[in-house]
Amino acid sequence: MPDKPTALRPSKRRRTAIATVTLFLLSASAAQTKDRSSVVKDFEERVQQYLETHKQTHVAMKPSDSPAKVEQQKQQASRKIQQARPEARQGDIFTSGVSAYFRERLALTLESAEGPKIRASLRRAEPLPNIRLKVNSRYPASLPLQSTPPTLIANLPRLPGELQYRIVGQTLVLYDLTSDLIVDLLPNAIPNGGNGQ
Amino acid sequence: MIARHWMVSLATAFLAVLCANAQSVENGGTPSQFAATTQLAVSTQAAPQLSRRLDVRLPLKDKSVRFAVIGDSGTGDRDQYEVAEQMETYWKATRFDFVIMLGDNIYGSHTPEDFVKKFEEPYKVLLDAGVKFYASLGNHDDPRLEPLYKPFNMDGQRYYAFRRGDVAFFALDSNYMDPKQLEWFDQSLKSSQGVWKVCFFHHPLYNDGRHHGSDLDLRHQLLPLFQKYGVNAVFAGHEHVYERMKLENNIDYFVEGNSAKLMTHDFSREGERIKGYDRDRGFMIIEITGDQLFFQTITRTGETIDSGELPRTSAAPSPSSQPQR
């Protein structure tokens, strides 16, 4: 009989230790989740701010028989947004916290079970080399837009219709489709580059 | 006297060659003879007679849905113009109503002059005759400009749907298949009243070409929707060859990425293709009538390299039966 409490003591201590570690891990995980959601929220707010500029500088893009007229509209839209954001710099939207989150998401997605399919799609989409791009500049006219694998897009925060995630070499580009502007850049985002090797 | 004799002899010989050419086409002549006779027929024959002369393998039924297919066409070089001339010839015989474009509609720069040289000029006869072109976007296209260019009939959108008779067409932007587009596609297929459902976009889900090959991630996203809603036929470009496949999912897949660009000797030795062609450029004509889809694939020189009749079949329910390549 006296053995029982003695025998229970280490077990109780173990249980207490396990509970403490579990609680610690849970709280750490909750903190991390909270951190992640606040990072995503921060990203979304910055995107929203950009869209406000978009709305203020709105240029109606109307279909036309004349490619010259369409090009004129596009140039006007680019110019207005460039002028409204003269101080735009790399990292305005992809802050250090947001960048870390995006790099982690991209790495996890490429290492997941879907990774081989995504890498194959990247390889087969005529991948682009690393080319120097500049925030608030127009996307180089001579450069095709490499397609972005759908699973990669689905694993990143959702964007409004005006913006897209594009890949140039190892860089993730936040691209404004309507004004043809590079909104922000995230270098070294795609491990081993857009050729998916 | 001698000169007149020579002229008579030459004229007789010329006429004899023309007659021999015409005869050989009716009997299934070689591509070069075929091309020569086609040009003669265009300038001298009315449309109904022309359709008999040309190697037209479509039923040309009343009220059928008839369209041409081109992909990777916008180079502005001689090859594109030669394919376009062949399209004109066949349009005169078949009177297809519209053309679907599988992307890379304008390669390189996108100045107003490029739109003329790489689209308006080569297809001028068709455009002037009221043949509509419905474009989808390729990786060389400008997603800002082209959807707003009226002759591409995209109505300012990257992806869109339209209907002709019993056939519902879905033009997708395979460069950027975001959740929003997938949701739109799901809803559009769900609400579609089309007896036939035809999709077209740039990147092929299946392809035996060595240069690009199949887009596996895109397939992973689109195939479940094709199967769920019974898509019947899919047209894609990107690989600069012609290819026809029918896989376990009961959908007919076509790759027509050689309407100006060409990758010769591109096919891997083994593959899923029923028919592949990588020796010349070309285009397709499709006719859908009742529960049948008729197709004819024609090269730059007027040779028919594939044709046939495909029945409308519903999609197989099991996505797990897909080959993984």
Image (spheres, coloured by chain):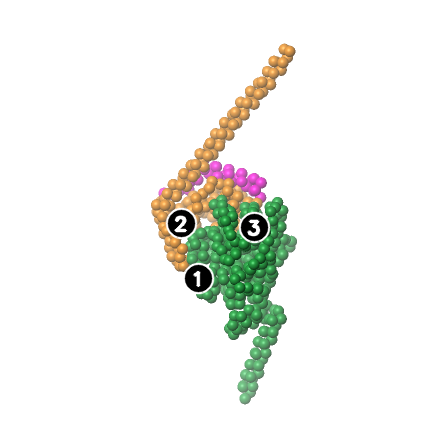
Residue occupying the point 51% across, 48% down: B190
Residue that label 1 marks: B116
Q: Secondary structure at mark 3?
A: loop
Residue A114 among those drawn in magenta: yes
Residues in magenta?
A: A87-116
Quarter-of-image position of residue B267: bottom right
Residue occupying the point 46% across, 65% down: B129
Q: Which chain, by letter, is orange?
A: A
- Look at label 1 and name its amino acid: Val
Which of the chains bears the disc numbered 3? B
Badge 1 density bin: few <14, some 14–19, many ≥20, Cα 10 Å: some
- Look at label 3 and name its amino acid: Gly
- Look at label 2 and name its amino acid: Ser
- For the residues beneath circles 3 and 2, the answer to whether they share a chain is no
Q: Residue B194 in the image: x percent, y percent?
A: 52, 53
Which of the chains bears the disc numbered 1? B
Q: Residue B113 in the image: x percent, y percent?
A: 42, 61
Residue B230: which disc? 3
Which color was chain B given? green
Q: Secondary structure at mark 2?
A: loop
Quadrant placement of the N terminus of chain B: bottom right
Inspect this view and state whether residue B207 appears.
no
Badge 2 density bin: few <14, some 14–19, many ≥20, Cα 10 Å: many
Badge 3 density bin: few <14, some 14–19, many ≥20, Cα 10 Å: many
Q: Nearer the viewer, residue B28 or A179?
A: B28
Give the distance between the C-alpha atoms of the residues marked 3 and 1, in whole angstroms.
38 Å
Query: Relative to B209, does residue B14 appear above or below in the rendering?
Result: below
Residue A179: which disc? 2
Are the residues at dot 3 and dot 2 in contact (C-beta closer than 8 Å)? no
Residue occupying the point 40% across, 59% down: A66
Give the distance between the C-alpha atoms of the residues marked 2 and 1, in whole angstroms.
23 Å
